[in-house]
Image (cartoon, rainbow, N blue to C red):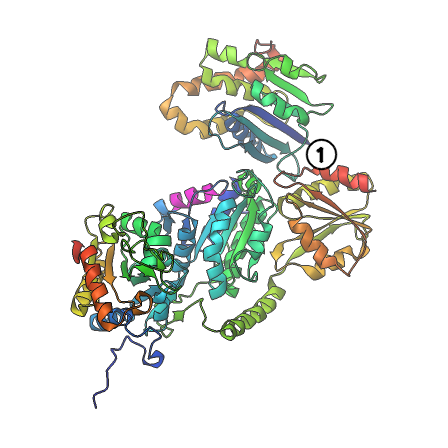
């Protein structure tokens, strides 16, 4: 999909998400107000005011909005929701049902400080919850944008991925990303680039569907799960994404994701100017996780620096991926619920060398 | 030649910190710059500290927040302790002398630019014009942002407010001019 | 010998169903099946069910069916109706799922006058899990979680009456009992007509048998229901 510079303008990250959702054909939103994702709900309400083909529901709580979203999807709507923090916790109820029943959903998460009410501002502490939440096996797709343009691009991608592969799909953002005001190219995907919906119910092409998430016997559930795992593994090959930038044989390989990766890129620019050999490995999908790409990225590195605004939620995945693969020093810059500035990363790298 | 200006505007909730941050960003964008702006605030709707992180550059901007500001604008005593860690050697600190006490910035050796925007606004216009005077003063410290574009941005952002308070349109125009011209004409916004 | 004939909406291959002998669900579902067939709405209806004993009505019909999480049936039904206005959406649940965990959604659906039809089967307890107290448990009733029959209130939860206080002009709220299948049929028909005519939220509470958890024989089961009728008055609370 080649963007053409037809609609570039200033907008907040949350506005970019709405524009992208509309561009890719979303037509139903069910949500509940929660900072820092509330703007998604208000902007959609505005859009639905002028476009009567859009459906909007502000439900009585997050579980209600999640289940109403699922209801809409079963009758063929491209429905989605947005939440954050404790709302994300409550949303695991409907999301685990979607996971079990292979119902395509798109959920925007604006991470904020946790646990509990925490702060309304920012964090990267909902990584575990978004990747593996609910009482399931993490049959989910999680996209992690690092700036406003990626918020736009990945929202479009999320909708297509959800309806193509039918796993609950997420845009894992944060308070800063959602509220940063900067230039975004709001390109319009072509019709053939948009995956369309198909109704589960009242679909003249199908027999009556009896959909359930409850089984009487252990083996019934086991067989269903095996099938889902196989489909997830196949789909992962097509979905997984990452990038490795900077020095090929870095003295320090920074591992970071989302907004922190953006910070790291700025830090690497400065450090490279000073003649230092630094690289960055950044997953674009947190689930499926780019295991092979990470293992390849560390092969030339001398040391690793893991940066995240959480207490090791990302670090644990990195260490699990590298277990038995390499033995180099791993340093942790963990700042739960606090933004990490480029200067801090530069400082940390210099101390490591 | 790389150009990047990091401007941090710090005040109390209700002082219009976010409005002028946005207007400054819009004006800089219209003038052809790359821009980024993000707010930082707590749960309160009013009161509490309000920070605006604005970046204006001639190339792609990375992270939307920064540790150290090139220009720091302080508009309330309450905001002072929050921004002390954002000061580096060459940070220029602008502050309103009536709203920020000498003590809160006493140990700082940087170049300071005290202004009397609040008293001018109260005396000559309307207290609401105070933050636009500040906006004009900020413009006099940076390159590459035209007053015409800032004026356009101001009008566009405040169009709805002008319906309720039509007199502000005129006051704000004067306030902006007064703020920006003070550097060259040594007008009295500086204490 | 005369064989029973199933109406077209009822799926033969999944019979006999898994309900306990003497359960009221089979009576209600049979009436609902007749209703769906007679109204000719098999290809227009969606049947949403909870996870209590109502779960056992999964695969009961040859009608699109969605089994949801506990207490979330109403919210799912609302989403379906909002997503497809001409669908006839029926939400089916017990008194536990409806008046306990799902009460919030019932009140809000009624308050918004969402144009769905809710059928709530009331046997005064959470039966699937072994007969624990529910909001509708009557004063002094012994259940698995109230072995002494003790209560904080004298009156059980009066669902349709409470919903009436937030109901709109066009809402339909009624209560009937499985001891009179024709009345169950009629009230459910009124509810569906209410939806088809676009008048808004419709709700039918059906007092029902549960000999398994009431621990009653056939006669005592009927007596128990007669007793329930004294606490839960039958009739159309709002039409």
Q: How many marks?
A: 1
Q: Quadrant of the C terminus of chain A?
A: top right
Q: Which residues are magenta?
A: A37-47
Residue at x 32% of width, y 80% of height? C12
Q: Position of residue C214 (x, y in %)?
A: 30, 65
Front residue (pair B108, C221): C221
Q: Give SS at disc 1.
A: loop
Residue C7: x %, y % from top left: 24, 77
To which residue does mark 1 refer? B2
* Chain bearing mark 1: B
A269 or C207: nearer the eye? C207
Quadrant in the picture for residue A213: bottom left
Crowding around mark 1 (Cα neighbors within 10 Å: few <14, some 14 to 19, many 20+) is: few
Q: Going by the picture, which residue comes out furthest to the bottom?
A: C1
Task: Say if A221 sits above or below A330 in the image.
Answer: below
Residue A174 visible in the picture: yes
- For residue C102, say whether it is visible: no
* Residue C37 screen position, x and y as percent: 23, 73
Determine which quarter of the picture holds residue C144: bottom left
Image quarter of residue B158 = top left
**Who's the residue at 21% across and 55% down the image?**
C231
Q: Is residue B32 magenta?
A: no
Residue placed most toward the observer, A146 or A61: A61
Q: Is residue A329 above or below residue B57?
A: below
**Residue drawn 51% across the image and 20% down it:** B132
Residue A40 is inside the magenta segment? yes
């Amino acid at each position: 999909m080649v963007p053409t510079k037809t609609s570039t303008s200033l907008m907040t990250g949350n506005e970019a998400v709405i524009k992208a959702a509309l561009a890719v054909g979303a037509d139903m939103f069910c949500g509940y107000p929660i900072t820092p994702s509330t703007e998604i709900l208000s902007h959609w309400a505005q859009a639905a005011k002028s476009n009567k083909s859009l459906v909007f529901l502000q439900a009585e709580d997050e579980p209600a909005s999640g289940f109403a979203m699922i209801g809409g999807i079963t009758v063929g709507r491209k429905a989605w929701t947005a939440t954050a923090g404790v709302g994300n916790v409550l949303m695991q109820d409907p999301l685990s049902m979607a996971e079990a029943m292979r119902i395509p959903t798109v959920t925007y998460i604006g991470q904020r400080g946790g646990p509990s009410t925490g702060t309304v501002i920012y964090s990267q502490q909902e990584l575990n919850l978004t990747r593996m939440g609910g009482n399931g096996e993490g049959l989910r797709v999680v996209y992690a944008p690092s700036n406003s343009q990626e918020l736009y691009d990945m929202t479009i991608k999320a909708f297509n991925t959800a309806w193509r592969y039918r796993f609950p799909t997420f845009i894992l953002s944060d308070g800063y990303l959602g509220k940063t005001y900067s230039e975004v190219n709001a390109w319009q995907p072509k019709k053939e680039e948009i995956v369309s919906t198909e109704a589960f119910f009242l679909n003249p092409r199908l027999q009556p569907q009896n959909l359930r998430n409850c089984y009487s016997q252990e083996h019934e559930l086991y067989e269903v799960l095996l099938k889902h795992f196989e489909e997830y593994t196949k789909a992962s090959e097509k979905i997984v994404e990452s990038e490795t930038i900077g020095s090929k044989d870095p003295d320090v390989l920074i591992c970071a994701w989302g907004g922190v990766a953006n910070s790291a890129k700025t830090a690497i620019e400065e450090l490279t100017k000073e003649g230092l050999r630094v690289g960055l490995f950044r997953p674009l999908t947190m689930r499926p996780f780019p295991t092979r790409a990470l293992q390849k990225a560390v092969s030339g590195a001398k040391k690793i620096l893991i940066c995240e605004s959480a207490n090791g939620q990302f670090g644990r995945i990195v260490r699990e991926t590298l277990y038995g693969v390499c033995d180099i020093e791993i340093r942790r810059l963990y700042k739960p619920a606090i933004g990490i500035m480029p200067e801090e990363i530069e400082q940390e790298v210099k101390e490591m060398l | 030649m790389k150009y990047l200006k990091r401007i941090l505007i710090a005040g109390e909730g209700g002082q219009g910190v976010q409005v002028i941050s946005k207007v400054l960003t819009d004006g800089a964008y219209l003038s052809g710059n790359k821009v980024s702006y993000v707010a930082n605030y707590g749960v309160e709707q009013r009161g509490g500290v309000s920070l605006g992180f604005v970046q204006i550059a001639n190339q792609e901007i990375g992270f939307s927040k920064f540790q150290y500001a090139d220009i720091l604008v302080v508009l309330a005593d309450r905001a002072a302790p929050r921004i002390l860690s954002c000061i580096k050697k060459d940070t220029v600190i602008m502050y309103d002398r009536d709203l920020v006490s000498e003590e809160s910035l006493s140990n700082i050796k940087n170049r300071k630019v005290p202004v009397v925007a609040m008293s001018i606004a109260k005396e000559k216009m309307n207290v609401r014009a105070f933050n636009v005077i500040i906006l004009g003063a900020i413009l006099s410290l940076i390159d590459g942002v035209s007053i015409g574009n800032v004026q356009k941005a101001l009008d566009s952002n405040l169009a709805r407010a002008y319906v309720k308070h039509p007199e502000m349109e005129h006051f704000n125009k004067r306030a902006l001019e007064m703020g920006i011209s003070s550097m060259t004409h040594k007008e009295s916004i500086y204490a | 010998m005369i064989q029973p004939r199933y109406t077209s909406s009822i799926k033969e291959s999944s019979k006999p169903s898994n309900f306990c002998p003497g359960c009221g669900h089979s009576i209600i579902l049979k009436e609902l099946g007749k209703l769906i067939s007679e109204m000719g709405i098999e290809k227009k209806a969606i049947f949403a069910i909870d996870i209590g004993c109502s779960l056992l009505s999964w695969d009961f019909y040859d009608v699109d069916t969605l089994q949801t999480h506990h207490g979330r049936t109403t919210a799912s039904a609302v989403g379906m109706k909002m997503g497809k206005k001409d669908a006839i959406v029926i939400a089916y649940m017990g008194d536990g799922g409806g008046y306990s965990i799902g009460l919030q959604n019932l009140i809000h659906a009624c308050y918004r006058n969402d144009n769905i039809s809710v059928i709530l089967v009331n046997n005064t307890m959470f039966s699937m899990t072994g007969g624990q107290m529910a909001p509708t448990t009557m004063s002094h009733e012994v259940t698995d979680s109230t072995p002494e029959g003790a209560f904080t209130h004298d009156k059980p939860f009066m669902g349709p009456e409470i919903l009436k206080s937030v109901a709109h002009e066009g809402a339909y709220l009624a209560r009937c009992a499985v001891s009179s299948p024709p009345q169950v049929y009629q009230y459910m028909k009124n509810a569906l007509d209410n939806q088809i005519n676009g008048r808004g939220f419709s709700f039918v509470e059906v007092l029902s048998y549960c000999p398994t958890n009431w621990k009653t024989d056939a006669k005592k089961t009927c007596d128990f229901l007669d007793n329930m009728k004294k606490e839960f008055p039958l009739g159309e609370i709002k039409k």
